Image: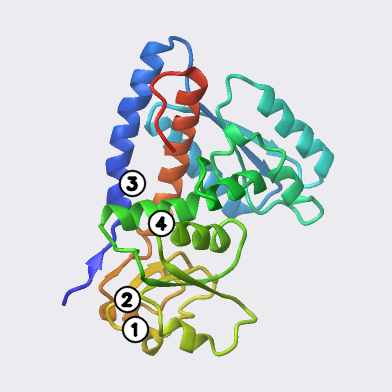
Amino acid sequence: MIPQILDGKLLAKQTEHSLSQRTAQLIMQNPGRIPILATILVGNDPSSATYVKMKGNACRRIGMDSLCIELDENTTTQQLIDIIKDLNANRNVHGILLQHPVPSHIDERQCFDTIALEKDVDGVTCLGYGRMSMNIEAYGSATPQGIITLLSHYDIQYKGKHAIILGRSPILGKPMAAMLLNKDCTVTICHSRTQNIQAHIQQADILIAAVGKPCFVQTDWVKPGAVLVDAGYHAGGIGDIHPDAFALSSAYTPVPGGVGPMTISTLMSQTLSAAEKALSINPSSI
């Protein structure tokens, strides 16, 4: 059987078209009001700067605007909190994104949790995570929510499947586990202290790899017919799963062009939903 390619790039492009139409309608019904995503970049990390630029470009492609706030490496936790509070109070800003990671001297969790729930379009607050895990309306963490959107689009079945998640980060692994549990998967999280990790991976009907190590998952670790979701990206265009393993799968996300585009697409969709809710014009469910 030829594995199905879970094409995130194609789906993100299709989604962008519908988001553009929704944005145009929102602006037409609210003259002078444009949905705005505020992005906060602290420090000089070139990768972070690239990601922020990509998100700004995505906003403009669908007719939204981006307010980019760039802060010095020496910004304090309190200074960052004060800026977030100002954005919370700014009625023209509909979504707030604090680019991860921030410099190590900043309390990132405290800053994340300062973001107002209704503007937490990147799904990073503890409150948002708690609501999402309890299946209560909230914006999901962008990457795992994008993965769910991608899997659902391609009609991947969840109920009763054993999902293995490699990685336990608060913005990917943990929310991913909660989302899949809510989809009736049996969920196992593996991490750096997991013993005999290969044996766990070999049980996966759905494997989500997010460990940040190139080709960490070897071909003989993969259960034939498994669905492989590779959330890693490394130099040379490889992910966390050895590319030879894809041939054994029933479906897989390519690297690049799989998970990455869906992360940005989700951020755009959730920002637009937040703007629709704020302006009370046919708000979309989230």
Look at the image and tell me in which quarter the N terminus lies: bottom left
Find disc 3 in the rendering and name its residue.
12
Q: If you read the primary sequence from the N terminus, does the residue marked by circle 4 or circle 3 appear first?
A: 3
Protein image colouring? rainbow
Real-space Cα separation, disc 2 to disc 4, in angstroms: 16 Å
Q: Can residue 143 be seen in the rendering of this structure? A: yes
Amino acid found under the numbered disc labelled 4: Ile
Residue 226's mark?
Answer: 2
Taking 192 as reference, is 177 left or right?
left
Image x and y of residue 7, in percent: 28, 57
**Would you call the spot at circle 3 few (<14 residues within 10 Å), some (14-19), or many (20 or more)?**
many
Do the residues under discs 2 and 1 have CB atoms within 8 angstroms?
yes
Find disc 1 in the rendering and name its residue.
223
Q: Residue at point 59% right, 88% down?
A: 195
Amino acid found under the numbered disc labelled 1: Lys
Amino acid found under the numbered disc labelled 2: Ala
Q: If you read the primary sequence from the N terminus, does the residue marked by circle 2 or circle 4 appear first?
A: 4
Which of the pair 185/265 is nearer the observer?
Answer: 185
Image x and y of residue 38, in percent: 59, 32
